[in-house]
Image: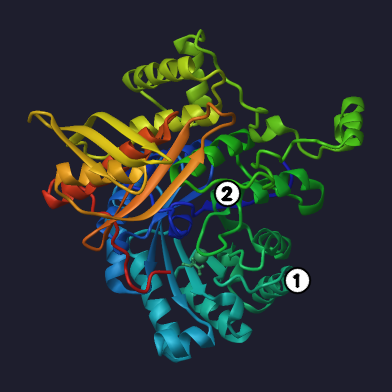
Amino acid sequence: MTGDQIIIFDTTLRDGEQSPGCSMNTNEKLKVANALVELGVDVIEAGFPIASPGDFEAVQMIASQFSDRSTICALARSRDDDIQKAKEALASAEKPRIHVFLATSAIHREHKLKMDKQQIIDRAVHSVRDAKEFCDDIEFSPEDAARTELDFLCEVVEKTIDAGATTVNIPDTVGYATPSHYFKVISYLKQHVSNIDRSIISSHCHNDLGMAVANSLSAIEAGARQVECTINGLGERAGNAALEELVMAIRTRADYYGVHTKINTERLFPTSQLVSSITGMKVQRNKAIVGQNAFAHEAGIHQHGMLQERSTYEIMRPEDVGYSGRNLVLGKHSGRHAFRDRTKELGFDLDDAAVQKAFDDFIVLADKKKEVYDSDIIALIDNRLADAPERWKLVSFHTSAGSSAIPTATLELKCEEQPVLCDAATGDGPIDAVFRAMERIIELTARLEEFNVRSVSEGKDAQGEVRVTINVHGRHYMGKSVSTDIIEAAARAYLQALNKADAERKGISEQPADEVAADSP
Ligand code: KIV
Ligand code: ZN
């Protein structure tokens, strides 16, 4: 292995989850955490426990299930109650880390915090000491560090290291830095902070100017030994540095950077697919490392070169990132063993019963579709694992529509042991009619805020995935489903969201839909 090891700090479940439309429920977060552990990330930032009971629960469960394999980190503002919640959420972790942050730039001091420099230092030192009473592994982030006066930044970093910070993270919160600027910031800290050797310097770059990965690599060149990143570059606004790009740049250019990571790179593509399927955030086709076109050579001259010698046009092998071409997987005659192996390769850890259910769905799908891809399998499993409380079940639906017909839907739903209920409605299209009929039966009115359809794989017979977000009395509920029939997928997705709203109305839900703390990072 070349040189120092770079610590990979993944924040898909915290900063990534802050991406608009990317919120995940606890079950989904556990699936992502499992994939991150298999990928070999060193630190998983599991959430921001004070933000909501759902965030708290997710950090707690990830800490109890995965902290023997990765360090589990919880975020806290520089406030006693935040730090207390982080401690509680991490109570069962074998390797806990508390990540405390407080903004330091003049803009944030004056306009957001209304605090002077000394107050910032006092508060930061107090919080690091408080967190330190719980565990040794403490990270401190001077938020908006890239726009903070360098001398003040040095002072904050020195004092928080003295107070016990073992990692100092230098966030480019608004994606303002450039590679040479960020290099200078990290170098300045190395030269001017007297105790800097007692702490690991970390980078945390946002992608507003498209430079998050380049800036993080510059930080490594300047001496940072931790990089904070997310799968597929998810994150606030334009996102964070993409984990897969950083890891493959470090590996492919080990000759230049002279460092290495512990990442199992063959898990990069499957993890990317899993996160994309769970969040609904599609990976752009030409995205580096994990895009569908990342290894496709179209030009004849390239193809010719590749046939002679791969290295003429290929700097990484697709198999090194776990990319297996078009992912044409199994046919309907493939056995259960082959199916189970493929689900493992795709990052799922299913028990026998779950494999059997997914396999049953796969056989039905393979009957309808000629070709079944990895993305189809991920969608099927996801569908099964969706943890919505299912009081109402879809028994049947019928729609009629056409250029000269009034779109109409007839629907049968069943609620627990009660008799099947039937109703019909018209709408401005067959899907609208289905939604209206459903609301009449369940006696719940919702506002549809988002409706997304995407093709899970290729071809006219592809499965369609529908994701909906509804608003019921100001609360948001998400539902998603897949089917080769998009009206059915839409019906099931809408029913899933209504079931969540109905469960909360009846007070039987374990997890509130969407509470977001004010002043969150
Ligand atoms: O971007 C940022 O400043 C953050 C901090 C909480 C580290 O996400
Ligand atoms: Zn951030």
Q: Please rate how many residues cluster around mark 2, counting C-alpha atoms within 10 Å: few if below 14, some from 14 to 19, many from 20.
A: many
Q: Is residue 78 left or right of residue 193?
A: left
The image shows residue 463, relative to residue 509, as above or below, that is: above
Determine the secondary structure under disc 1: helix
x and y percent of residue 435 in the render? 28, 44
The reply to whether residue 509 is visible in this rendering is no
Determine the secondary structure under disc 2: helix
x and y percent of residue 391 in the render? 17, 37
Say whether disc 1 or disc 2 marks the residue closer to the N-terminus: 1
Residue at 24 percent across and 34 percent down: it is 410
Quarter of the figure with the N terminus: top right
Q: Is residue 310 left or right of residue 283?
A: right
Residue at 45 percent across and 12 percent down: it is 336
Kind of residue at badge 1: Ser
The image shows residue 484, relative to residue 314, as above or below, that is: above
Near-viewer residue (152 or 324): 324
x and y percent of residue 27 in the render? 33, 41
Q: Residue beneath label 1, please? A: 180
Q: Please rate how many residues cluster around mark 1, counting C-alpha atoms within 10 Å: few if below 14, some from 14 to 19, many from 20.
A: few
Q: Quadrant of residue 181?
A: bottom right
Near-viewer residue (55 or 425): 425
Q: Residue beneath label 2, please? A: 232
**Which residue is most to the left?**
418
The image shows residue 284, relative to residue 389, as above or below, that is: below
Q: Quadrant of residue 89?
A: bottom left
Q: CA distance from mark 1 to mark 2?
A: 24 Å
Residue at 61 percent across and 26 percent down: it is 327
Residue at 76 percent across and 50 percent down: it is 258
The reply to whether residue 439 is visible in this rendering is yes
Quarter of the figure with the C terminus: bottom left
